Structure formats: structure tokens, C-alpha cells
Amino acid sequence: MLGEILSLVAAFGWVGSSIFLEKASKEVGTLAVNLIRLLLAMVFLGIITNMRRGMILPFDANRESLKFLSISGLFGLFLGDFFLFKAYINIGSRITLLVMTFSPIAVSILSFFLLGEKIELVKILGMLLTILGIIIVILKKKSDKKFSKIGLLYSGLAMFGESLGVVFTRIGSVHYDSFATIQVRTIPAILAFILYISFKSEWRNIKVGISNKKGMLYITLGTIIATIGVTSIVEAMKY
């Protein structure tokens, strides 16, 4: 039962953070939101892990955890979130999150091939029902002026990146602290965004984003809620 409750908390965290981070993306741009929120998350997580474990950073992570959680961070927190925030701008959080509901299905399929997990008949029926619901809403939205094919593509890529991130997190987070797990995932994602921003020469826009008080408020609120949600899903996977 605890696993189900934590999963529900994660779902509310995902929805709540998306509302604030969509607003932040429109205020300061997607790259600024991605980098700033990850840096803020590391600060929040560092405070929590210092209180819980006496360590600001995950110095005790073994090589196996570092490998899989780093891969998870690159897929989920870098590539997945990179396209996620672009989708927010193009089609909004409502349709983006609708596409993201396909993520548990993708995780089940990827786990079947990568982890050898079984998919029961009742789960297959649930997957088909979810897919049907997504198709109905997306087809209906074609008449909406805001509907964007590129936005739909972005949300699909975000969903795939997040799903791969979840699978590799499951492999690397076994018997390891949930907050420290998120730290290990976050560090390579931050480095990847720094390299990308430097390559695109976007640091001026990052500075402008930091000076936007309204945008920073949205990022801070979204990051706090997202951190609770992501930590909850990591803990839920252990149950």
C-alpha cells in the first residue's frame, strides 16, 4: 500500500510542478528553467541529505549505481526534460501531460526487454485503455489552433527519455537512499546542460532569466514540488 501512496504523491507532484514550470518556461525560456531548477534541486537535496545522512553529496555511491544513475540522468533529466519544456511551450502542459501518461506503458515495455519483467494480461488491457484515451483526446485537439505536430513530437521524445530514465533508475537505486539517488542523476544532467548552453552561447539568456523575479518564483515552486514527486517515485519503485 505504501508504494501505491508514494506513486500517487509522485503523480500529484508531476502535475503540480508542470503548471509552475510551464509558466516559468514562458517567462524565462526553457534552457534557463532546466538549468536553474536542477541547480536549485541540488541545493534542496543537499540540505536534506546532510540532515538525513550527514553528507551533502552522494560520496558513498558505488560504481554500479553511478553508472546506471548517470545514464538515467542523461536520458531523463537532460534529454527528457529538454524536450518536455519545449512541449510545454508548443502545446501546453495539459496535452503534454496527456502524452506523458504513456510513460508507464513505455516503462513496462522497456522493463520487459531490459529487465525481463513479465506483463500480466490485466496490465495489457490497462495499457490499451490508456492508449485509446490518448488517441481520442489528441485527435480531438486537431481542431484546436494551438495544436502543434512539433509539440506532439517533443512530448513523445520527452516521454521516451523519461521512461528510459525510470528504467535505469530502477537498476541503479536498489538499496540506496532516494534523495541521494536523485542527486546522482542530477549531476550529469547539469553538466550536460552547461555544455549545451556553452555550445549555443546562451549564457546571456540564463542571466536574464535569473533576474526575472516572477520566473524565478515559478521555478522555485515547481522545483520544490518536482523534487517531492521525483523522490516519491524513486521510493515507490522499492515497494
Image (cartoon, grey):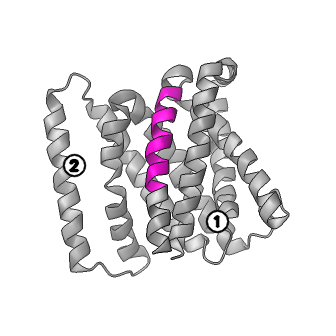
Counting from the top left corner in percent of width and height, residue 30 is at: 52, 30
The residue pinned by badge 1 equals: 178
Q: Residue at x 55, y 65 (%)?
A: 234
Q: Which mark is residue 21?
A: none
Counting from the top left corner in percent of width and height, residue 207 is at: 70, 21
Magenta residues, start to end: 10-24
In magenta stretch: residue 78: no
Q: Which mark is residue 134?
A: 2
Mark 2–mark 1 contact, CB under 8 Å? Answer: no
Q: Amino acid at mark 2?
A: Ile
Q: Residue at x 85, y 64 (%)?
A: 54
In magenta stretch: residue 20: yes
Q: Main secondary structure of the magenta part?
A: helix
Check the image and report above or below for 87 versus 102.
Answer: above
Q: Residue at x 46, y 31 (%)?
A: 22
Q: Residues within 10 Å of mark 2 (few under 14, many from 20)?
A: some
Q: Which quarter of the rendered picture does the N terminus lie within? A: bottom left
Viewer-nearest residue: 114 or 32: 32
Residue 200 in view:
no
